[in-house]
Amino acid sequence: MSKILVLVDHTDGTPKKVTLELLTKARMLGEPAAVFVGQGYANAKDRLAEYGAATVYVAEGSEYDAYVVAPKAEVLARVVADTSPAAVFVPSTPEGKEVAARLAIKIGSGVITDAVDVRDGFVCEQSVFGGATIVQSKVAQGVPVITIRPNSTAPEPAPASPTEERVTVELPESATLVQVVDRVVEKKGARPELSEAAVVVSGGRGVGGAENFGVIERLADSLGAAVGASRAATDAGWYPHQYQVGQTGQTVSPQLYIACGISGAIQHRAGMQTSKTIVAVNKDPEAPIFELVDFGIVGDLFAVVPQATEEIEKRKG
Amino acid sequence: MNIVVCVKQVPDTWAEKRLDPSDKTLDRDSADAVMNELDEYAVEEALRLKEKHGGEVIVLSMGPDKAVETIRKALSMGADRAVHLVDDALSGSDAVQTSYALAQALSTLQWDLVMLGSESTDAKMSVVPAMLAERLGRPQLSFANKVEISDGTVRIERLTDVGHDVVQGPLPAVVSVVEKINEPRYPSFKGIMAAKKKPLETLSAADAGSEPSRVGLANAPCTVEDFAVRPPRQAGTIVQDEGDGGHKLVEFLASQKFV
């Protein structure tokens, strides 16, 4: 069976959920081979085996983390050259897409981003124009390079005993042009990352001010959810820009999306329309968000949301 | 310091977009066309860097005849001159091909910085800046929320999921910017009038050094096999809050096993 390379997305070695999703998807279509680049492989090893990696290519070293994006593309290009895989899967995160972009140029392949599913023959399903259109596309030249969105596949363990192969790549000058000088973590706390959260609670214009976002955050925390915001809220400075969901912000596709005080303009829908279950709370019964919802409540979010939070906390005991 | 700003004309951010059934590419006539919003921030940042460091701001756009409107807008904001890469042979090019055609065109220009928006609001791939850096063999300084230049080094704040990384590389470099890096200026009346007299050079794919076999829909490294408009979501349950809305919400979540 042909190998499918999966680039491991990790934090200090610990694989992110999307990595396990991609290994699961790769197993459905071929033989999953994980490619680990960076530091902390000891933290990754067991998880990659648990989720069925038949081979793990390990390029471990601080030099791969010291420069932006390019080293990961170099390592992948090397492993592609050595193993002639059937395809390369990369998580569809902003950085993952850049790695895929550079890899595609290096190996002379086409690249497809933001796949929500990959089927036999590496036909990719994409959800474009904010989820309004579903496209089936294929890479027609070279080894297909495909970025797959978080939450596209349910991760399933399939314990394996991977063969481990160490990879050393002498980074060319072009891969070491951009140095990382500092990493600033602004977000602290236990909330999951917006892009891969299973549940997202978002606030919009109806929240009315930065001081009121606590209402949204408390509901999010009761559900173990990430917090998002509409453009109206981020433009007004009520919530940091990186949490913006929408056409000019992040695209999310969680199991559950709860929109609070968000009218649902195209700008916003484009970033959340593919969520599996959508719930909205809005004062305006005519708000377009209600066209999308599985469950909607017409009412004041400052009454409904705290009541829901309290009820969830009570049920959790 | 000379800066080339790449701008793309896209359907209006707020418009419904659709694919053309005949060739499965974006139907660019079905919606009003505007400058890709994130490119406006790139133009603004380029103008600010020019105000600080001197030099020239050159607009580069690949697109059909109509893209001249977007080029004029960048000129009316204050860019000095423009190059329009326009050729039927380029039509339908995907990101890999577009980055090739732009890189070839860039090699005909003198620049210290190439600037562009971090993604277009139509395709939303956000891969062209990285592809350009790879092709040009120059630093990729993408997702910039802040750009500073001193002593031949570009330092940016690169937005990440958890905050930002401070990263730097030597000039010449490729810089892509995110929204919020600045507040783009509106073209003044004077700017609009002046833009009409600014040099606008038109290049064909061949003029700009692109091999015909490497661009255009027929040679695209990715193919769209099929597409369909997503059926509207089934109408959900909508209830009026009568003092128990929060409880009803939780009942729904519990019925779906979220609680």
Image: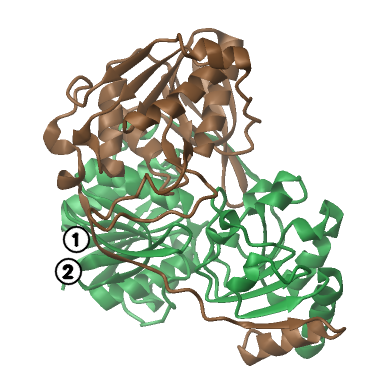
Chain colours: A green, B brown
A216 horizontally vs B17: left or right: right
Q: How many residues crowd mark 2 within 10 Å: few (<14), some (14–19), many (20+)?
A: some
Q: Do the residues labelled 1 and 2 touch (CB within 8 Å)?
A: yes
Name the amino acid type tagged 1. Answer: Pro
Helix, strand or loop for disc 1:
loop
Report the chain holding disc 2: A
Q: Is residue B1 visible?
A: no
Question: To which residue does mark 2 refer?
Answer: A2
Residue B201 vertical position relative to residue A116 in the rendered view, above or below: above
Residue A188 vertical position relative to residue A108 in the rendered view, above or below: below
Image location of residue A285, percent across then percent down: 73, 72
- Quadrant for residue B87, please give it: top left
Residue A37 vertical position relative to residue B105 in the rendered view, above or below: below
Helix, strand or loop for disc 2:
loop
Report the chain holding disc 1: A
Question: What is the quadrant of the C terminus of chain A in the image?
Answer: bottom right
Q: Is residue B122 visible?
A: yes
Question: Which residue is at the front of the view, A50 or A156?
Answer: A156
Q: Which residue is drawn at 43% across and 30% down?
A: B7
Image location of residue B64, percent across then percent down: 31, 33
Q: Which residue is drawn at 25% across and 44% down?
A: B92
Q: How many labels does the image show?
A: 2
Question: To which residue does mark 1 refer?
Answer: A85
Q: How many residues crowd mark 1 within 10 Å: few (<14), some (14–19), many (20+)?
A: many
Q: How far apart are marks 1 and 2 (CA)?
A: 6 Å
